[in-house]
């Protein structure tokens, strides 16, 4: 969010890089942005809300610029690897977990302490969700959801008059449960219980775990399954950085993609430590793409759609 405040043109360019790599969905730079966090830095609540709105505006501006470039191009595929093909593009407003606000790595453990309760989480997230839902985004992306309690909080907030759809993406560190140890199947059932939720899946999880997680989710949801893993690298919560050389290269990451689609994933992309090159490789690897499916109207897309986490 820092670059969004100081130099929004950088964030806009990042969004554009992913669109030109073939992404159909771009996610706002609001994952770790909260009104409470802004207030702790000396901003007013009104200023915090304005910055949340700005994250959506920047993504929408990038989409507009991209469409203008498409109109000005005589070809869909440029020699330098850029894709300028007019297609439906969604802007998803990112809402990170409470652990992301804490910035202590607890979105990778789901451990918020024994005193945590549902009403606290709803109160914490409520205004941010309302602001982002009213800012012009096509949907809300609840990301890196680490436990069942927070999934329930998000679902209940959606029922409080939120007028755009949402997805819930959980994370796992063992390929079986979500990071807190809660059952992934139970978490997915919570998400699937809400009519506002139009996709359920996994993000920021090593690629090697994704196949089994798709199988688990598929048993309990009729919604499209979305998958956007990280590079497989480990996160050091104390140093607050990713450990280099612990992940997989793009070619290995992409080698999983067709299998994920065959298993039931409808939306595929990349999260932390993936790049536009990853998305470009996914775009080239997917067996077929349906350009007739209007994603803005429905996320019931065929396997082969591409999405990306951008921050």
Image: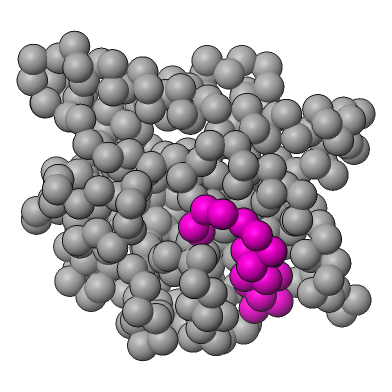
How many marks on residues? 0
Q: Which residue lies at the image location 25% right of the left edge and 16% below the top edge?
A: 69
Toward the top, the furthest residue is 72
Camera sees residue 139: yes
Instruction: Pinpoint residue 208: horizontal percent, then vertical percent.
Output: 36, 68
In the image, residue 268 above or below residue 151: above
Looking at the rendered image, the quarter that the C terminus falls into is: top right
- The answer to which of 181 and 75 lies nearer the viewer is 75
The segment highlighted magenta reads 148-166
**Can residue 250 be found in the magenta stretch?**
no
Q: Residue 196: x, y in percent?
A: 51, 66
Work out which quarter of the rendered image holds the N terminus and state it: top right
Magenta-colored stretch includes residue 150: yes
Nearest to the observer: residue 295 or residue 66: 295
Q: Nearer the viewer, residue 101 or 192?
A: 192
Whether residue 263 is situated above or below residue 33 in the rendered picture: below
Can residue 113 be seen here? The reply is: no
* x 27%, y 28%: residue: 20
* In the image: residue 189, left or right of residue 269: right
- Drawn side of residue 201 relative to residue 298, left or right: right
**Place of residue 162 in the rendered image (x, y in percent of width and height, measured from the top left):** 62, 56
Above or below, comparing residue 237 to residue 16 in the picture: below
> How was the colour assigned to the protein in this rendering?
one colour
> Residue 219: which quarter of the image?
bottom left
Q: Residue shown at 19%/44% (left/top)?
A: 283
Q: Quadrant of residue 57?
A: top right
Q: Residue at x 28, y 16 (%)?
A: 68
Give x and y (percent) for residue 200.
44, 69
């Amino acid at each position: 969010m820092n670059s969004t405040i100081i130099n929004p043109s950088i964030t806009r360019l990042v969004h554009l890089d992913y669109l030109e790599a073939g992404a159909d969905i771009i996610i706002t730079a609001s994952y770790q942005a909260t009104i409470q966090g802004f207030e702790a830095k000396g901003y007013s609540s009104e200023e915090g809300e304005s910055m949340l709105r700005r994250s959506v505006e920047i993504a929408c501006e990038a989409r507009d610029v991209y469409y203008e470039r498409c109109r000005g191009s005589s070809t869909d595929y440029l020699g330098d690897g850029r894709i300028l093909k007019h297609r439906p593009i969604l802007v998803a407003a990112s809402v990170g977990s409470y652990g992301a606000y804490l910035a202590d790595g607890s979105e990778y453990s789901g451990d918020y302490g024994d005193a945590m309760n549902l009403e606290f989480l709803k109160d914490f997230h409520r205004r941010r969700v309302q602001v982002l839902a009213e800012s012009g985004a096509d949907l809300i992306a609840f990301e890196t959801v680490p436990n069942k309690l927070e999934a329930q909080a998000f679902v209940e907030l959606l029922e409080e008059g939120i007028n755009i759809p949402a997805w819930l993406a959980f994370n796992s560190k063992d390929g079986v449960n979500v990071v807190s140890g809660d059952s992934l199947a139970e978490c997915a059932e919570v998400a699937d219980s809400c009519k506002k939720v139009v996709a359920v899946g996994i993000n920021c999880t090593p690629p090697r775990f994704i196949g089994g997680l798709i199988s688990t989710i598929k048993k309990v949801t009729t919604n499209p399954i979305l998958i956007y893993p990280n590079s497989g690298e480990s996160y050091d919560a104390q140093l607050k950085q990713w450990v280099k050389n612990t992940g997989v290269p793009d070619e290995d990451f992409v080698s999983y993609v067709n299998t994920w689609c065959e298993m039931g994933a409808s939306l595929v992309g990349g999260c932390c430590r993936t790049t536009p090159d990853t998305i470009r490789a996914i775009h080239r690897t997917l067996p077929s793409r349906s350009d007739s499916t209007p994603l803005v109207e429905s996320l019931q897309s065929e396997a082969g759609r591409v999405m990306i986490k951008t921050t």
